[in-house]
Image (tube, rainbow, N blue to C red):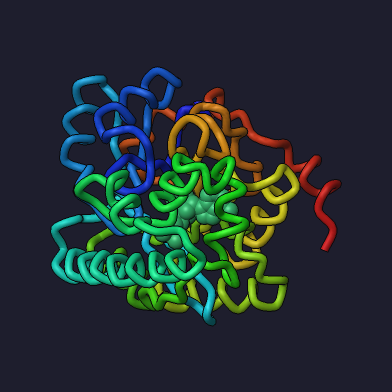
Amino acid sequence: MSLSIDLHAHSNISDGLLAPSALVEHAFNHNIKLLALTDHDDTSGLAIAEIETARLGMQLIKGVEISVTWKKRTIHIVGLKINPEYPPLKEGLAAIRAGRHVRAIGMAAGLDKVGIMGSLEGAYEYAQEGIISRTHFARFLVNTGVAKDNKAVFKNYLVKGKPGFFEHQWASLEEAVSWIVGSGGVAVIAHPGRYDLGRTNMLLLLEEFRAVGGDAIEVVTGSHTADQYLEFAKYAQLFGLKSSQGSDYHGKGISFMEMGRLPALPSNCVPVWQDWPEAEFAKSPFAQNQIPEKLLLETVSD
Ligand code: AMP
Ligand code: MN
Ligand code: MN
Ligand code: MN
Protein backbone atom coordinates (compact mmCIF):
# COMPACT_ATOMS: atom_id res chain seq x y z
CA MET A 1 0.00 0.00 0.00
CA SER A 2 2.88 2.33 0.52
CA LEU A 3 3.19 2.12 -3.25
CA SER A 4 0.09 4.25 -3.33
CA ILE A 5 1.88 7.15 -1.64
CA ASP A 6 3.52 9.80 -3.83
CA LEU A 7 4.87 12.84 -2.00
CA HIS A 8 6.54 14.74 -4.86
CA ALA A 9 4.83 15.79 -8.09
CA HIS A 10 4.55 18.83 -10.36
CA SER A 11 1.69 20.49 -12.17
CA ASN A 12 1.86 23.18 -14.83
CA ILE A 13 1.79 25.80 -12.09
CA SER A 14 5.53 25.06 -12.10
CA ASP A 15 7.25 22.95 -14.75
CA GLY A 16 4.91 19.97 -15.03
CA LEU A 17 2.77 19.37 -18.10
CA LEU A 18 -0.61 18.69 -16.49
CA ALA A 19 -2.90 21.22 -14.85
CA PRO A 20 -3.41 20.52 -11.12
CA SER A 21 -6.78 18.81 -11.59
CA ALA A 22 -5.45 16.67 -14.45
CA LEU A 23 -2.42 15.75 -12.36
CA VAL A 24 -4.68 14.56 -9.55
CA GLU A 25 -6.68 12.48 -12.02
CA HIS A 26 -3.44 11.05 -13.42
CA ALA A 27 -2.39 10.06 -9.88
CA PHE A 28 -5.81 8.49 -9.25
CA ASN A 29 -5.49 6.46 -12.45
CA HIS A 30 -2.10 5.22 -11.27
CA ASN A 31 -3.49 4.00 -7.93
CA ILE A 32 -2.13 6.84 -5.82
CA LYS A 33 -4.21 7.40 -2.69
CA LEU A 34 -2.03 9.94 -0.91
CA LEU A 35 -0.58 12.64 -3.15
CA ALA A 36 1.53 15.70 -2.43
CA LEU A 37 1.49 18.43 -5.04
CA THR A 38 4.93 20.05 -4.72
CA ASP A 39 5.29 22.72 -7.38
CA HIS A 40 8.53 24.68 -7.47
CA ASP A 41 8.26 27.87 -5.41
CA ASP A 42 4.51 28.18 -5.94
CA THR A 43 1.46 26.91 -4.06
CA SER A 44 -1.30 28.22 -6.26
CA GLY A 45 -2.26 24.77 -7.58
CA LEU A 46 -3.16 23.45 -4.14
CA ALA A 47 -6.69 24.82 -3.92
CA ILE A 48 -7.83 23.05 -7.09
CA ALA A 49 -5.87 19.92 -6.19
CA GLU A 50 -7.69 19.83 -2.87
CA ILE A 51 -11.09 19.95 -4.53
CA GLU A 52 -10.14 17.28 -7.05
CA THR A 53 -8.58 14.87 -4.52
CA ALA A 54 -11.70 15.18 -2.33
CA ARG A 55 -13.90 14.46 -5.33
CA LEU A 56 -11.94 11.30 -6.13
CA GLY A 57 -11.68 10.09 -2.53
CA MET A 58 -7.94 10.65 -2.34
CA GLN A 59 -5.86 12.42 0.29
CA LEU A 60 -3.92 15.56 -0.63
CA ILE A 61 -0.79 16.68 1.16
CA LYS A 62 -0.20 20.36 0.56
CA GLY A 63 3.35 20.73 -0.61
CA VAL A 64 5.95 22.92 -2.27
CA GLU A 65 9.50 22.43 -3.56
CA ILE A 66 11.65 25.40 -2.59
CA SER A 67 14.80 26.37 -4.51
CA VAL A 68 17.74 26.91 -2.16
CA THR A 69 21.36 27.91 -2.62
CA TRP A 70 23.68 26.08 -0.26
CA LYS A 71 27.45 26.43 -0.67
CA LYS A 72 26.93 27.84 -4.18
CA ARG A 73 24.88 24.79 -5.19
CA THR A 74 21.18 24.55 -5.89
CA ILE A 75 19.40 22.25 -3.47
CA HIS A 76 15.66 21.57 -3.42
CA ILE A 77 13.74 21.43 -0.16
CA VAL A 78 10.28 19.92 -0.26
CA GLY A 79 7.75 21.13 2.28
CA LEU A 80 4.91 18.75 3.17
CA LYS A 81 1.74 19.57 5.12
CA ILE A 82 2.47 23.27 4.72
CA ASN A 83 0.06 26.10 5.30
CA PRO A 84 0.34 28.10 2.06
CA GLU A 85 -1.23 31.13 3.77
CA TYR A 86 1.56 31.46 6.37
CA PRO A 87 2.87 34.96 5.60
CA PRO A 88 6.65 34.29 5.75
CA LEU A 89 6.21 31.30 3.40
CA LYS A 90 3.93 33.22 1.07
CA GLU A 91 6.25 36.23 0.95
CA GLY A 92 9.39 34.12 0.65
CA LEU A 93 7.97 32.22 -2.34
CA ALA A 94 6.82 35.46 -3.97
CA ALA A 95 10.38 36.80 -3.69
CA ILE A 96 11.79 33.61 -5.27
CA ARG A 97 9.33 33.90 -8.15
CA ALA A 98 10.36 37.52 -8.73
CA GLY A 99 13.98 36.33 -8.76
CA ARG A 100 13.06 33.69 -11.34
CA HIS A 101 11.91 36.43 -13.69
CA VAL A 102 15.19 38.34 -13.33
CA ARG A 103 17.11 35.12 -13.88
CA ALA A 104 15.06 34.31 -16.99
CA ILE A 105 16.05 37.68 -18.48
CA GLY A 106 19.70 36.78 -17.82
CA MET A 107 19.27 33.33 -19.37
CA ALA A 108 17.71 34.83 -22.49
CA ALA A 109 20.53 37.37 -22.79
CA GLY A 110 23.04 34.51 -22.70
CA LEU A 111 21.15 32.67 -25.43
CA ASP A 112 20.90 35.87 -27.51
CA LYS A 113 24.70 36.03 -27.46
CA VAL A 114 24.98 32.71 -29.26
CA GLY A 115 22.33 33.72 -31.79
CA ILE A 116 19.29 32.08 -30.23
CA MET A 117 16.80 34.93 -30.22
CA GLY A 118 13.37 35.29 -28.67
CA SER A 119 13.84 32.74 -25.88
CA LEU A 120 12.37 34.89 -23.10
CA GLU A 121 9.04 35.30 -24.88
CA GLY A 122 9.33 31.74 -26.16
CA ALA A 123 9.81 30.28 -22.68
CA TYR A 124 6.98 32.36 -21.23
CA GLU A 125 4.64 30.92 -23.88
CA TYR A 126 4.99 27.57 -22.08
CA ALA A 127 4.67 28.98 -18.57
CA GLN A 128 1.21 29.28 -17.08
CA GLU A 129 0.37 31.80 -14.40
CA GLY A 130 2.96 30.18 -12.09
CA ILE A 131 6.72 30.18 -12.35
CA ILE A 132 9.22 30.51 -15.20
CA SER A 133 11.90 27.79 -15.13
CA ARG A 134 14.68 26.24 -17.14
CA THR A 135 12.18 23.57 -18.20
CA HIS A 136 10.18 26.23 -20.06
CA PHE A 137 13.32 27.38 -21.85
CA ALA A 138 14.03 23.74 -22.64
CA ARG A 139 10.62 23.34 -24.26
CA PHE A 140 11.17 26.41 -26.40
CA LEU A 141 14.64 25.27 -27.47
CA VAL A 142 13.48 21.76 -28.34
CA ASN A 143 10.36 22.91 -30.17
CA THR A 144 12.35 25.40 -32.26
CA GLY A 145 14.82 22.67 -33.22
CA VAL A 146 17.83 24.05 -31.32
CA ALA A 147 18.22 20.73 -29.48
CA LYS A 148 16.75 17.31 -30.04
CA ASP A 149 15.29 16.59 -26.61
CA ASN A 150 15.03 17.71 -23.03
CA LYS A 151 18.14 15.86 -21.96
CA ALA A 152 20.29 17.31 -24.75
CA VAL A 153 19.02 20.82 -24.22
CA PHE A 154 19.95 20.85 -20.54
CA LYS A 155 23.35 19.37 -21.20
CA ASN A 156 24.26 21.77 -24.01
CA TYR A 157 22.49 24.98 -23.06
CA LEU A 158 21.10 25.16 -19.55
CA VAL A 159 23.74 23.95 -17.11
CA LYS A 160 26.77 25.73 -15.63
CA GLY A 161 29.23 26.85 -18.30
CA LYS A 162 26.59 26.79 -21.08
CA PRO A 163 25.09 29.85 -22.81
CA GLY A 164 21.65 29.72 -21.21
CA PHE A 165 22.90 29.28 -17.66
CA PHE A 166 22.65 32.30 -15.41
CA GLU A 167 24.06 32.15 -11.89
CA HIS A 168 21.30 32.80 -9.40
CA GLN A 169 20.99 33.11 -5.65
CA TRP A 170 17.94 31.29 -4.28
CA ALA A 171 16.71 31.22 -0.67
CA SER A 172 19.03 30.06 2.10
CA LEU A 173 18.58 26.60 3.62
CA GLU A 174 17.62 28.16 6.92
CA GLU A 175 15.00 30.42 5.33
CA ALA A 176 13.35 27.61 3.37
CA VAL A 177 13.20 25.26 6.36
CA SER A 178 11.92 28.00 8.67
CA TRP A 179 9.13 28.98 6.25
CA ILE A 180 8.03 25.35 5.97
CA VAL A 181 8.31 24.45 9.64
CA GLY A 182 6.86 27.81 10.74
CA SER A 183 3.80 27.11 8.60
CA GLY A 184 3.29 23.80 10.41
CA GLY A 185 4.92 21.63 7.75
CA VAL A 186 7.73 19.10 7.49
CA ALA A 187 10.93 19.97 5.59
CA VAL A 188 12.38 17.24 3.36
CA ILE A 189 15.60 17.28 1.31
CA ALA A 190 14.51 16.44 -2.24
CA HIS A 191 16.46 13.86 -4.31
CA PRO A 192 19.73 14.10 -2.33
CA GLY A 193 21.46 11.78 -4.80
CA ARG A 194 21.24 14.39 -7.54
CA TYR A 195 23.52 16.99 -6.00
CA ASP A 196 26.80 15.22 -6.52
CA LEU A 197 28.03 16.49 -3.17
CA GLY A 198 30.47 13.80 -2.12
CA ARG A 199 30.30 12.26 1.32
CA THR A 200 31.86 15.14 3.28
CA ASN A 201 29.49 17.79 1.94
CA MET A 202 26.51 15.45 2.21
CA LEU A 203 27.27 14.97 5.90
CA LEU A 204 27.60 18.75 6.32
CA LEU A 205 24.32 19.37 4.51
CA LEU A 206 22.44 16.82 6.59
CA GLU A 207 23.94 18.17 9.82
CA GLU A 208 23.01 21.74 8.95
CA PHE A 209 19.56 20.72 7.68
CA ARG A 210 18.78 18.95 10.92
CA ALA A 211 20.17 21.84 12.99
CA VAL A 212 17.80 24.33 11.33
CA GLY A 213 14.74 22.09 11.84
CA GLY A 214 14.72 19.76 8.82
CA ASP A 215 12.99 16.46 9.46
CA ALA A 216 13.26 14.09 6.49
CA ILE A 217 15.03 13.18 3.24
CA GLU A 218 13.75 11.58 0.09
CA VAL A 219 15.08 8.06 0.01
CA VAL A 220 12.98 6.65 -2.80
CA THR A 221 12.57 9.13 -5.65
CA GLY A 222 12.20 8.82 -9.39
CA SER A 223 15.76 10.06 -9.86
CA HIS A 224 17.55 7.69 -7.47
CA THR A 225 19.04 4.36 -8.47
CA ALA A 226 18.30 1.26 -6.40
CA ASP A 227 21.73 1.63 -4.77
CA GLN A 228 20.87 5.18 -3.82
CA TYR A 229 17.68 4.04 -2.06
CA LEU A 230 19.89 2.04 0.24
CA GLU A 231 22.59 4.69 0.52
CA PHE A 232 20.14 7.39 1.59
CA ALA A 233 18.24 5.05 3.88
CA LYS A 234 21.54 4.76 5.73
CA TYR A 235 22.04 8.50 5.86
CA ALA A 236 18.51 8.91 7.20
CA GLN A 237 19.22 6.38 9.91
CA LEU A 238 22.56 8.00 10.75
CA PHE A 239 20.97 11.42 11.25
CA GLY A 240 17.69 10.29 12.77
CA LEU A 241 15.77 11.72 9.82
CA LYS A 242 12.49 10.37 8.51
CA SER A 243 12.24 9.08 4.96
CA SER A 244 10.04 10.23 2.12
CA GLN A 245 9.14 8.85 -1.28
CA GLY A 246 7.92 10.57 -4.42
CA SER A 247 8.06 10.14 -8.16
CA ASP A 248 8.95 13.80 -8.96
CA TYR A 249 6.50 13.35 -11.82
CA HIS A 250 6.49 16.21 -14.35
CA GLY A 251 4.60 14.67 -17.26
CA LYS A 252 5.01 12.26 -20.13
CA GLY A 253 8.46 12.44 -21.69
CA ILE A 254 10.05 14.72 -19.10
CA SER A 255 9.88 12.62 -15.96
CA PHE A 256 12.35 10.27 -14.45
CA MET A 257 9.49 8.02 -13.45
CA GLU A 258 5.79 7.42 -13.97
CA MET A 259 3.51 7.57 -10.93
CA GLY A 260 2.67 4.43 -8.98
CA ARG A 261 5.92 2.66 -9.85
CA LEU A 262 8.12 3.48 -6.87
CA PRO A 263 9.40 0.60 -4.77
CA ALA A 264 8.64 0.79 -1.06
CA LEU A 265 11.04 2.36 1.42
CA PRO A 266 13.79 0.13 2.79
CA SER A 267 12.60 -1.45 6.05
CA ASN A 268 15.03 0.48 8.28
CA CYS A 269 13.37 3.77 7.28
CA VAL A 270 10.88 5.67 9.39
CA PRO A 271 8.28 6.89 6.88
CA VAL A 272 7.68 10.63 7.04
CA TRP A 273 3.95 9.83 7.00
CA GLN A 274 4.23 7.58 10.06
CA ASP A 275 2.00 9.74 12.28
CA TRP A 276 -0.19 11.28 9.62
CA PRO A 277 -3.92 10.59 9.83
CA GLU A 278 -4.04 10.97 6.02
CA ALA A 279 -1.86 7.83 5.74
CA GLU A 280 -3.92 5.70 8.10
CA PHE A 281 -4.78 3.37 5.20
CA ALA A 282 -1.09 2.43 4.81
CA LYS A 283 -0.59 1.41 8.45
CA SER A 284 -1.52 -2.26 8.33
CA PRO A 285 1.57 -4.49 8.52
CA PHE A 286 0.15 -6.28 5.48
CA ALA A 287 0.17 -2.98 3.64
CA GLN A 288 3.94 -2.69 3.79
CA ASN A 289 5.98 -3.95 0.91
CA GLN A 290 9.42 -3.02 2.03
CA ILE A 291 12.92 -3.97 0.99
CA PRO A 292 14.09 -6.54 3.62
CA GLU A 293 16.71 -5.26 6.04
CA LYS A 294 18.86 -8.29 5.21
CA LEU A 295 19.23 -7.09 1.64
CA LEU A 296 20.01 -3.63 2.92
CA LEU A 297 22.81 -4.83 5.17
CA GLU A 298 24.29 -6.94 2.43
CA THR A 299 24.21 -4.19 -0.14
CA VAL A 300 25.42 -1.14 1.72
CA SER A 301 29.00 -1.02 2.87
CA ASP A 302 30.25 1.94 4.79
P1 AMP B 1 14.96 25.60 -12.46
O1 AMP B 1 14.34 25.46 -11.10
O2 AMP B 1 14.36 26.70 -13.28
O3 AMP B 1 16.46 25.67 -12.41
O4 AMP B 1 14.60 24.28 -13.26
C1 AMP B 1 14.92 23.07 -12.65
C2 AMP B 1 14.07 21.98 -13.26
O5 AMP B 1 14.60 21.62 -14.51
C3 AMP B 1 14.11 20.72 -12.42
O6 AMP B 1 13.10 20.75 -11.45
C4 AMP B 1 13.84 19.66 -13.44
O7 AMP B 1 12.45 19.56 -13.66
C5 AMP B 1 14.50 20.22 -14.69
N1 AMP B 1 15.87 19.71 -14.88
C6 AMP B 1 16.98 20.07 -14.21
N2 AMP B 1 18.06 19.43 -14.68
C7 AMP B 1 17.62 18.65 -15.69
C8 AMP B 1 18.25 17.75 -16.61
N3 AMP B 1 19.55 17.54 -16.56
N4 AMP B 1 17.47 17.13 -17.51
C9 AMP B 1 16.14 17.36 -17.55
N5 AMP B 1 15.49 18.18 -16.73
C10 AMP B 1 16.21 18.82 -15.81
MN1 MN C 1 11.09 20.55 -12.12
MN1 MN D 1 13.84 19.07 -7.64
MN1 MN E 1 10.55 18.20 -8.20
- Where residue 271 appears, x then y in whole percent? 50, 46
Residue at 41%, 53% in the rendered image: 137
Question: Which quadrant would the C terminus be assigned to in this image?
Answer: bottom right
Residue 212 shows in this picture: yes
The answer to whether residue 100 is left or right of residue 217 is left
Number of marks present in the image shown = 0
Q: Quadrant of residue 5?
A: top left
Residue at 56%, 54% in the rendered image: 154
Observer-nearest residue: 257 or 151? 151
- Where residue 34 appears, x then y in whole percent? 37, 33
Observer-nearest residue: 67 or 218? 67
Residue at 53%, 48% in the rendered image: 146
Residue 218 shows in this picture: no
- Where residue 157 appears, x then y in whole percent? 55, 60
Q: Quadrant of residue 78?
A: bottom left
- Where residue 253 appears, x then y in whole percent? 52, 33
Residue placed furthest toward the front: 115
The answer to whether residue 26 is left or right of residue 102 is right
The vertical placement of 183 against 128, above or below, is: below
The vertical placement of 288 against 220, above or below, is: above
The answer to whether residue 150 is left or right of residue 91 is right
